[in-house]
Image (tube, rainbow, N blue to C red):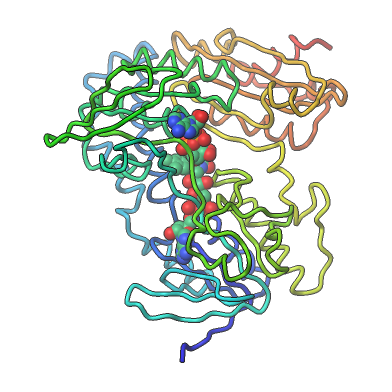
Amino acid sequence: MTPTIEYDVIVIGAGPVGKNVADRVVRGGLTAAIVERELVGGECSYWACMPTKALLRSASALRAARQVPGAREAVTGDLDVAAVLGRRDSFASQWKDDGQVAWLDSAGIALHRGHGRIRSARTVEVTGADGVTTRLTARHAVVVATGSSALLPDIPGLREAAPWSSREAASARAVPRRLAVIGGGVVATEMATAFAALGSSVTVLARDGVLPSVEPFAGELVTESLREAGVSVRLGTEAASVNRDDSGTVHIETADGARVEADEVLVAIGRTPNTQDIGLDRIGLAPGAWLAVDDTLRVVGGGEWLYAAGDVNRRVLLTHQGKYQARAVGDVIVARAKGEKVEDGRWGRHAATADERAVPQVIFTDPEIASVGLTAAAAAAAGLRIRVVDYDLSAVAGSSLHADGYKGHARMVVDEDRKVIVGFTLAGPDVAELIHAATIAVVGEVPLDRLWHAVPAYPTVSEVWLRLLETYGR
Ligand SMILES: Cc1cc2nc3c(=O)[nH]c(=O)nc-3n(C[C@H](O)[C@H](O)[C@H](O)COP(=O)(O)OP(=O)(O)OC[C@H]3O[C@@H](n4cnc5c(N)ncnc54)[C@H](O)[C@@H]3O)c2cc1C
Ligand SMILES: NC(=O)c1ccc[n+]([C@@H]2O[C@H](COP(=O)([O-])OP(=O)(O)OC[C@H]3O[C@@H](n4cnc5c(N)ncnc54)[C@H](O)[C@@H]3O)[C@@H](O)[C@H]2O)c1
């Protein structure tokens, strides 16, 4: 007979989102268990955000130094690849989760290692590496936070060619001489930027263009800079077949008949939810599907005890936004358990309202792309009456001081009916740290009239705010 352990809340998946859900419910006075089949910390800590940003950062620092006379002369060598990989290893905690396990412990969250599957309402079975099964029951809620995995397209020969996914790219032990990248999205452009800087000869097959989901000028600037860095960017091209020969060389034939040779091929065409084998069939939901949720993150058609947060619900596939959902879902579970008022109205404490139209993202390419809210195209498609205001970022005093030859662009999308900003995009060196001001303006729905009183300091890159307002007119 399998023993049963009872908790108030069971969370499946100890990625950034699951950990934050568990923390929130424990802080709210409930008990929580978290189930993890791999490493506590999830994709973000070991194979996504942290290691990829560590791979990119050294080259970015070097580029910055080379753009400023005086500092440029002090740069006497190239990137130290071994040191970059070593720093990446430390940011991935050497792929060990002791630190994060200790944190769970200090937060009072029980960890059950193994594969979690929902068995019936409020019941989760955990199968450990030794095959032993533990049964957990939840008094109040089960939260699915199992994340997502790389999607592999059905291209003849691709699977047999042992392609890299983002995992292998993020944790690479060596830099391939030639790297082919299938895809033109965020992973593809960040990894093309990183590996080109580390010395690979990179070819990008961007079927749908480069960064098609951000403002077009951003994709164009990234394409231009990748090409300047020696990357072959092939727009509108897709791989038709792939073959790895006995010597290890990968041969890709594209749909338009061209051939690409590489030592590794990275597939970066999006994600698939980790819901194939989590027992959804036992509760009448489709295995392998993204979990649709309401604004309090409760699974549609899943019973009042089932929630899903983070990548797995497909609302926004970003760590910070998943953690935002985690705070909302953790708090709403506590509120419902204690019979307290649920604040699920727009911008309420228990609703993940920002997911709709106020999501910030930084893409760590060269130049960096930092955005929040809607692009001009998305705002127009949503039926908003908009005005688009553009400004050349290099024309701001702070930019020219920041780096010689600073190249960049800024766009503000204004909802003309409400006179508030609904979208903001910056492309340029080191713009990552500038985006939060725009996020506050979008979330706060700050009227343009009031923004005139938010004076950017001189001489900073932030002066672009003033220039955009002047261009808009008072
Ligand atoms: C290459 C790359 C770079 C990225 N860079 C950034 C970035 O810079 N900034 C950013 O905001 N986002 C970034 N992202 C996105 C970010 O990684 C995800 O949005 C984030 O990891 C989602 O967190 P999560 O907790 O929902 O899922 P995950 O991090 O995927 O965690 C899910 C956890 O659940 C576990 N699990 C799954 N199924 C089970 C089961 N049945 N039983 C037990 N455990 C299970 C998994 O082992 C995993 O630990 C990047 C993604 C990629 C691929
Ligand atoms: N800095 C960051 O915030 C960061 C970094 C990396 C990843 N991420 C997140 O991780 C997620 C996954 O990233 P991703 O780059 O895999 O996905 P993505 O959705 O950003 O890009 C995938 C690209 O592949 C293209 N594509 C789709 N199917 C294809 C096919 N069969 N052949 C060729 N191209 C195809 C799409 O048009 C799209 O441009 C994203 O949602 C992203 O937000 C974030």
Q: Which of 258 and 64 is in front in this view?
A: 258
Task: Please give the count of numbered marks on the rendered protein.
Answer: 0
Instruction: Tell me the quarter of the picture where residue 343 sits.
Output: bottom right
Relative side of 415 to 36, left or right: right
Does the rendering let one see residue 97? yes
Q: Which of 368 and 134 is in front in this view?
A: 134
The spot of residue 301 in percent (x, y) is: 71, 62
Does the rendering let one see residue 363? no
| Residue displayed at 55% across by 43% down | 318
Instruction: Tell me the quarter of the picture where residue 357 sits.
Output: top right
User: In the rendered view of the protein, which quadrant contains the C terminus?
Assistant: top right
Seen as rendered, the residue at the extreme bottom is 1
Residue 177 vs 286, above or below: the answer is above
The spot of residue 282 in percent (x, y) is: 58, 71
Relative side of 427 to 375, left or right: left
Relative side of 428 to 268, left or right: right
Relative side of 71 to 312, left or right: left
| Residue displayed at 53% across by 84% down | 5
Q: Which of 23 and 33 is in front in this view?
A: 33
The spot of residue 405 in percent (x, y) is: 45, 8
Residue 287 vs 371, above or below: the answer is below
| Residue displayed at 62% across by 23% down | 425
